[in-house]
Image: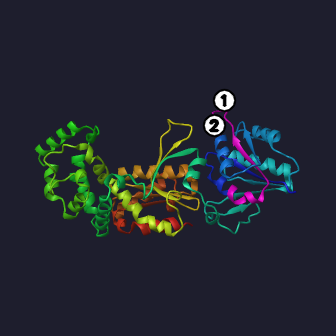
Amino acid sequence: MSNNVLVLMVGTNPLPNYIVGSYLKENYDKFVFIYSEKNEDINQSSTKDYANKLKKHLNLDNCTLLPLSNVSNPSAIRDDLKEKFPEDNIDEVHLNYTGGTKTMAVHVYNFLKENFAKKFNASYLDARSHKLIYDNGEKESAKLKDKIKIDIDTLLSIHLYKKNKLETNDTYTYKQKFGDNFDSVSEKIKNAIKDGKGKDFVKWLENPFRKIFKGNNKLLEQTEKFKEHIQKLSDSNPSPIYEFNNKTLPFIWDILNAFPEDKRIVKNNRFPDRIEDVENIRYTVKFLDGIWLEWYVYNEIRSKLQEKGLQEGKHFGISLEAKKENSPESPNFELDIFIINGYQLVGISITTSDKQGDCKLKGFEVIHRVRQIGGDESKAILITGMEPSKKDALQEDLSFMTGTANDKIVVFGVDDWADIGNKICGEVFQWH
């Protein structure tokens, strides 16, 4: 009986380990996961939890977890390996050194090569070709991106996150809030964008909509303060309420009147003289403030992704939120929309803003998020209200400032909205 061992080094990005482990596990009898153990004297954190998650999700029975006491010290690494590495009648040792630190890779590689000589071979996962490349220069013929798939729950779990929220077409919050009217609202927004009216809608949202409904101190959660705010606006000159009543375009009135009657922010095609029930309009205001664009984009890609074999809720979804399992104080992991093609995570962040500063912050955030759990293979898409010249400049700027390859961050502007479904799918499925 053969005794072939696959060795993986586990760092804080376990996705390459999952990919390689999934692809090679049928060829090996035993597995060794080398991880860093907690060492407060040198400020070294542990990656044991990542190793355990990998063991669980790869469904491995014969797996040894091997801790390194100091991943920056060559002699300590060698001492740990001498003491803990299994040596019982091994026929082959294969090291994939995609994960872990560079110091770990060098000294684990040298130790295994010295101790197992011709029984030893190694490989790494090339992020460009998506193939395993072996020490002798040979490449696997198969692209692992076409072979290995991962769902969002597994991807989050191996990074020690637990999903708190994920919405789909059937569970979407605003569908529940607006009931039968939701489809009508969505359709009118879609028609406006397809007719090239996106710029006019965004301009209206900036003024008068946000000047009336957006402000400090959570206006809509304080009924009396909101009423005082409206009174001040009515007395001001120029008044956003006058702008609302006299300069709102017909297609926008159609959208506003499509909301459920008890949740409309208008009455008889005018801003109402009095708003008694502020509670009822909160979700309408929030949806109009920008969530409508998230839903429009999601609706434009949903059927296209399903046609490609991706499953809603597993490989794509909207309003994703997750939390570190054992760190309740850590900030939430959030993505407006996510798509997983094979094992490539595509994160989509959406803003109606055309302001350079706002869009740049959103770009930094989505690049950081997708790298957190998607690694080097991930891709970030930022959808903005920018004009073409500005969006191209922002894409170059984000790529340069974050060290992201130019094809791994894509910025779309308002002129892309009408055909955004095809443009996003072009970026997702033309995965080089």
At horizontal 63% and vertical 61% (from top left) the residue drawn is 148
Looking at the picture, how far across and down is residue 124, in whole percent?
A: 69, 57
Magenta run includes residue 44: yes
The colouring scheme, among rainbow, by chain, secondary structure or one colour, is: rainbow
Looking at the picture, how far across and down is residue 351, in whole percent?
A: 36, 54
Quadrant assignment for the N terminus: bottom right
Looking at the picture, how far across and down is residue 211, in whole percent?
A: 22, 48
Q: Is residue 143 above or below residue 332?
A: below
> Is any atom of residue 26 visible in this view?
yes
Q: Between residues 302 and 136, which one lies in front from this camera angle? A: 302
> Is any atom of residue 214 visible in this view?
no
Q: Amino acid at mark 1?
A: Asp
Q: Between residues 95 and 32, which one lies in front from this camera angle? A: 32
At horizontal 15% and vertical 50% (from top left) the residue drawn is 272
Q: Is residue 364 left or right of residue 233?
A: right
For the record, the magenta segment spans 21-47
At horizontal 54% and vertical 41% (from top left) the residue drawn is 324
Which residue was labeled with disc 2?
45
Query: How would you rate the neighbour count of disc 1 (Cα within 10 Å): few for under 14, some for 14-19, many for 20 or more?
Result: few
Which residue was labeled with disc 1?
41
The image quadrant that residue 232 belongs to is top left
Looking at the picture, how far across and down is residue 399, in whole percent?
A: 48, 56
Q: Is residue 18 left or right of residue 263?
A: right
Mark 2–mark 1 Cα distance, whole angstroms, equals: 10 Å
Q: Is residue 98 above or below residue 41?
A: below
